Amino acid sequence: MTAFEILKANLLSPIVLAFLLGIVTKVMKSELSLPKDLYSSLSIYLLLAIGLKGGVELSESTQLSFWAALLQSRLI
């Protein structure tokens, strides 16, 4: 995978796109408001996207790297 493909995949992820939408609406001083049902659906979708992406990364890691990262985070 080239650096451009990695950058493209990361920038087009739902999490980044939702973050950019928030930035754009604040810069434009827009009164963007989503209906309550759409807001709930987007929240659930984003949480699932974060969880699935983290789960995939966790499944591809070794136990040694997992425990090393866990210990490092506990030291902080």
Image (cartoon, grey):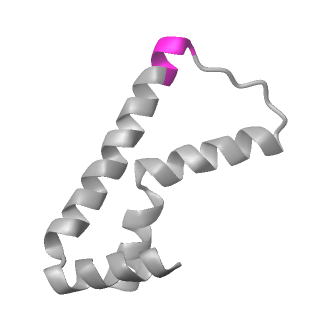
How many numbered badges does the structure rendering display?
A: 0
Image point (38%, 41%), residue name: 47
Residue that extends furthest to the front in the rendered view of this protein: 75
Residue 61 point in image, percent of width and height: 19, 77
Task: Choose top left, top right, bottom left or bottom right for residue 48.
Answer: top left
In percent of width and height, residue 40 lies at 46, 22
Furthest toward the right, the residue is 29
Residue drawn at 78 percent across, 41 percent down: 26
The front one of 66 and 27 is 66
Magenta stretch, overall SS: helix
Residue 74 coordinates in the image, percent (x, y)? 43, 75
Residue 16 part of the magenta segment: no
| Residue 58 location, quadrant | bottom left
Looking at the picture, tell me which residue is in the foreground, 12 or 35. 35
> Could you tell me which quadrant the N terminus lies in?
bottom left
Indicate the position of residue 30 as horizontal and vertical percent values.
Answer: 79, 30
Residue ID at (24%, 68%): 57
Q: Residue at x 41, y 83 (%)?
A: 72
For residue 51, side relative to residue 17 (left or right): left
Classify residue 58 as left or right of residue 22. left
Q: For this view, does 19 lie left or right of residue 45? A: right
Q: Is residue 50 visible?
A: yes
The one of 37 and 72 positioned closer to us in this rendering: 72
The magenta-colored residue range is: 35-39
Q: Is residue 9 above or below residue 14?
A: below
Tell me, yes or no, if residue 1 can be seen here: no
